[in-house]
Image (cartoon, helix red, strand yellow):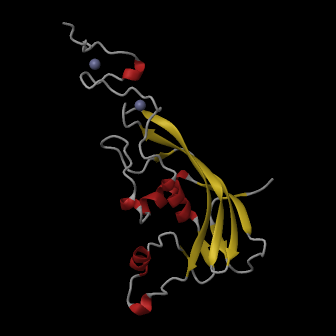
Amino acid sequence: MESVFNNLVFALEAWPETGQERDFALSPATLTELLASGKNLEQLPVVDQGENQSVIPKILTSMRGHIKLMLVGRKLKVKGFFAVKVELICARCLTPFVSRIDDKFDDLIKLREPGKNDLRGVDANQDLDQEGDDSAIVIRDGQSFDLAPLMAEFFWLAFPYKALCRDDCAGLCPRCGANLNEGPCYCPTQQPTKH
Ligand SMILES: [Zn+2]
Ligand SMILES: [Zn+2]
């Protein structure tokens, strides 16, 4: 039986030429924390889940997937896929529904030493933003890096712009608020005027 890792920390030391790969499962708590601390949170496409909804959806299952890594010079080729179930609120009928967020990824991402820019008196994060290089992977302690924050970014990239329980959701009656997916309400319908 192959083991499933609950983290995405990889060591650069003794990096195999054939690369590294693993099955992973990030718990709902871990993913939620990553999403909450994500520096990109404010730059997100507007997640229209209706009013008064938390920006971060309720994570229902572990984020499961597979990742394969290859070193290409000072860059990292990151390839794989993930899937996770979340609870969304339909933007039209305001009903909670379960949605599966999944995606494949295949990216070449820069590896970056931390504090490289400190000499210039530039804050590392600020510098990242200026370069538009949000996805650079920071090497910790000169020897390892954590790809869990990157997975949180991939999650957002795969996130729907508008949460709908189904494409043809009928929404709520603007008059009485009835959920029109459950059938017509008793409001008088506007008949076209006949002359
Ligand atoms: Zn709906
Ligand atoms: Zn109505």
- Taking depth in this image into account, of 187 and 1 the one nearest to the observer is 187
Q: Is residue 120 above or below residue 139?
A: below
Residue 180 in sight: yes
With 19 as the anchor, is 101 left or right in this view? Answer: left
Looking at the image, the residue that sits furthest to the bottom is 119
Counting from the top left corner in percent of width and height, residue 34 is at 48, 61
Work out whether residue 48 or residue 11 is closer to the camera in this orientation and state it: 48
Residue shown at the point (69%, 75%) measured from the top left:
71
Q: Position of residue 157 (x, y in %)?
A: 50, 55
Q: Nearer the viewer, residue 103 or 88?
A: 103
User: Exactly how many numbered labels are in the figure?
Assistant: 0
Residue most toward the right? 1
Residue positioned 26% across, 26% down in the render: 174
Q: Quadrant of ligand 1?
A: top left
Q: Quadrant of residue 40?
A: bottom left
Looking at the picture, does residue 169 appear above or below residue 129? Answer: above
Q: Quadrant of the C terminus?
A: top left
168 left or right of 68 in image: left
The correct choice, above or below, for 113 with respect to 161 in the image is below
Please say whether residue 139 is visible from this viewpoint: no
Residue found 71% across the figure and 61% down from its top: 22
Give how far across and how far down residue 63 sits, in percent: 59, 51
Q: Give how far across and how far down residue 25 sits, in percent.
A: 63, 54
